Image (cartoon, rainbow, N blue to C red):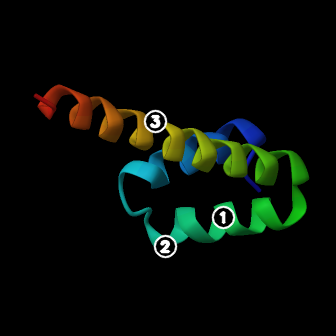
Amino acid sequence: MLSCAEATRLMSDAMERPLPVKDRLSLNVHLAMCKGCRNFGTQLQGLRKVAREYVRRTEDDSRAP
């Protein structure tokens, strides 16, 4: 079974690229049993959403006359 450190690394990697099937399955098993890592995943998704919105607004502001 994955450690929490390995699981968090895979969650971060999954934001950038598709994971191999083995890694994806291992991560899903870990997440099914680890509430802390599920919480981390939720927080990671939230941070990514906020960062994307910040970039979008910054780009919109730079285009304004």
Q: Return the x and y of residue 32 as percentages of the image width and height.
A: 83, 67
Q: State the mark number for residue 26.
A: 1
| Crowd rating for badge 1 (residues with CA inside 10 Å; few <14, some 14–19, many 20+) | some
Residue labelled with disc 3: 51
Q: Return the x and y of residue 15 as percentages of the image width and height.
A: 45, 51
What residue sits 76% from the left and 41% below the top?
Answer: 4
Q: Quadrant of the N terminus?
A: bottom right
The mark tally for this picture is 3
Kindly give the residue lying farthest to the front in the view shown: 65
What residue sits 43% from the left and 66% below the top?
Answer: 20
The first of marks 1 and 2 along the sequence is 2
Quick one: SS at disc 1?
helix
Residues at circles 3 and 2 in contact by the CB criterion of under 8 Å: no
Query: Alpha carbon of mark 1 to alpha carbon of mark 2: how far?
Result: 9 Å
| Crowd rating for badge 2 (residues with CA inside 10 Å; few <14, some 14–19, many 20+) | few
Quick one: SS at disc 3?
helix
Describe residue 17's horizontal placement relative to residue 35 as left or right.
left
In front: label 1 or label 3: 3
The first of marks 3 and 2 along the sequence is 2
Q: Amino acid at mark 3?
A: Ala
Please state which of residues 64 and 23 is positioned toward the viewer in this rendering: 64
Quadrant in the rendering for residue 27: bottom right
Q: Amino acid at mark 2?
A: Val
Q: State the mark number for residue 21.
A: 2
Please state which of residues 52 and 63 is positioned toward the viewer in this rendering: 63
Whether 38 is drawn above or below 32: the answer is above
